[in-house]
Image (cartoon, rainbow, N blue to C red):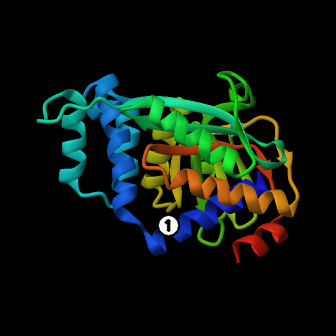
Amino acid sequence: MAGHSKWAGIKHKKAIVDARRGKLFTKLGRAITVAAKEGGGEVEGNPSLALAVQKAKDASMPKENIERAIDRGTGAGADAAAFEAVAYEGYGPGGVALLIEALTENRNRTGADVRHTLTKFGGSLGEPGSVAYLFSQCGLIVVDAGSHSEEELMVAIDAGAEEIEVDEDVFEVITAAGELAAVRAALDQAAITYQSAELVQRPTVRVEINESDASTLLKLIDALEENDDVGDIHSNFEIDAEVLERIAG
């Protein structure tokens, strides 16, 4: 997971620096709206909403924006939402698997846009179920290895985390999907800071790709992320750290 995680770290830091807050808040708001629509507007009784709201707070999304997004999902707002969650499965350069999560009010438009972007960068859209089996949902908390030691993170194991992996300059705390909130709360209680804490689709099989395919693949991911409807993008690529640094630099 080294290459993928390193890229995620670079993307995270870049997002903090150049922010693109308007687009980010739009995507976060949609996630909150859909979670509220599917499970109700009470954070305490809706784990999906709780995670979506926490992710928005982590990005410094204003409280009023969060409340409006919840209202849209529950129908309390003037513009009750018609968004739905959809997932697209496909392949990128080098044969890597891509699981693309989107929130849209027009699945035909979004599907056509995703297909076009994949094709433009040498990928292809697959049938439902074609790559989903290569991923397993789990919680992932990323901690800067320069700020905390692995021993300090044992509090996460005590709280229910499954394992802690060392990946370049970060620790990856892996949890079952249902244990993410509890483990995060334990880290907060222990005053341990982290870069991100979210549900992810973790690849069970990884594919190593060369520099040429890696460069095109990262451009593909960037293009997909530019789509307002696209939320999280999961992949199973593995890239050598030195190659990744050359591409990112």
Residue drawn at x 24%, y 42% is 69
Q: Residue at x 75, y 43 (%)?
A: 236
* Above/below status of 95 relative to 226: above
Disc 1 secondary structure class: helix
Q: Residues within 10 Å of mark 1 (few under 14, many from 20)?
A: some
On the picture, is 202 further left or further right than 176?
A: right
Locate residue 126: give its quadrant. Answer: top right
Q: Tell whether 42 sits left or right of 112.
A: left
Q: Residue 25, position in %: x, y?
A: 34, 55
Q: Quadrant of the C terminus?
A: bottom right
Confirm whether residue 157 shows in the render.
no
Splitting the image into 4 quarters, where does residue 181 fall?
A: top left
Answer yes or no: is residue 76 visible. Answer: yes
Given the image, on which type of amino acid does mark 1 rest? Ala
Whole-percent x and y of residue 229?
Answer: 44, 43
Q: Is residue 35 left or right of residue 125?
A: left
Residue 213 at what x, y percent from top left? 82, 56
> Mark 1 = which residue?
15
**Which residue is located at x 21 percent, y 28 percent?**
74
Q: Nearer the viewer, residue 208 or 195?
A: 208
In the picture shown, does residue 16 fall above or below 100? below
Q: Residue furthest bottom?
A: 249
Q: Quadrant of residue 105?
A: top left
How many numbered marks are there? 1
